[in-house]
């Protein structure tokens, strides 16, 4: 009766109405800064030097919480961090908890 894919799409489309975007960006920047990302020897061309943070998944779990994947592209002076932060959102308490950061650091060409 419930289309879970459409429910996820609805959450992805409207996340900024229930998650403060500025606080999320600050939270992700802190987690990426504190994470040990793998440095890649291969430089990548950078066309856009702006910060990019996108929520790509908002999946319900069996424990009635949601797993959220926040994709990031964070340029620094000579490097760029690219990856995903995994979070857990509890809709009953409003808590947003950090699980892990997966990503790489690339040298900018």
Image (cartoon, grey):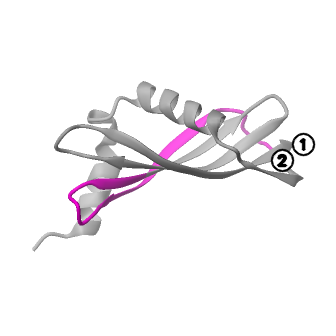
* Residue 109 counted in the magenta span: no
Task: Please report whichever mark, 1 or 2, sits nearer to the chain's N-terminal start.
Answer: 2
Give neighbour class at mark 1: few <14, some 14-19, many 20+ (Cα, 10 Å): few
User: What is the x, y in percent for residue 71?
Assistant: 54, 49
Please tell me which residue is depicted at 44% across the width and 32% down the height of the picture. 24
Question: How far from the left and from the top, in percent, is residue 64?
Answer: 20, 58
Residue 56 shown in magenta: yes
Q: Residue 17 sits in which quadrant?
A: top left
Q: Residue at x 65, y 33 (%)?
A: 33
Circle 1 sits in a helix, a strand or a loop, which is it? loop
Q: Which residue is mark 1?
A: 109
Q: Nearer the viewer, residue 108 or 60?
A: 60
The quadrant in which the N terminus is found is bottom left
Secondary structure beneath disc 2?
A: loop
Query: Marks 2 and 1: in contact by CB < 8 Å?
Result: yes
Left or right: residue 44 versus residue 63 is: right
Left or right placement of residue 37 versus residue 56 in this view: right
- Within 10 Å of disc 2 (Cα), the crowding (few <14, some 14-19, many 20+) is few
Residue at left 20%, top 70%?
3
Q: Which residue is mark 2?
A: 45
Q: What is the spatial separation of the Cα atoms under label 1 and label 2, in whole angstroms?
A: 5 Å
- State the extent of the magenta-drawn residues as a range: 45-68
Residue toward you, 91 or 35 = 35
- Give coordinates of residue 2: x percent, y percent: 14, 69
| Residue 85 in view in this figure | no
Q: Which mark is residue 3?
A: none
Query: 42 or 35: which is nearer to us?
Result: 35
């Amino acid at each position: 009766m419930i289309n879970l894919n459409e429910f996820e799409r609805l959450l992805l489309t409207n996340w900024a109405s229930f998650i403060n975007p500025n606080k999320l960006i600050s939270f992700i920047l802190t987690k990426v800064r504190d994470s040990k990302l793998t440095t890649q020897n291969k430089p990548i061309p950078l066309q856009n030097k702006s910060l990019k943070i996108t929520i790509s998944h908002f999946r319900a779990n069996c424990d009635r919480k949601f797993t959220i994947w926040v994709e990031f592209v964070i340029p620094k002076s000579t490097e760029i961090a690219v990856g995903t932060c995994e979070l857990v959102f509890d809709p009953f308490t409003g808590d947003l908890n950090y699980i892990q950061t997966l990503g790489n650091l690339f040298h900018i060409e």
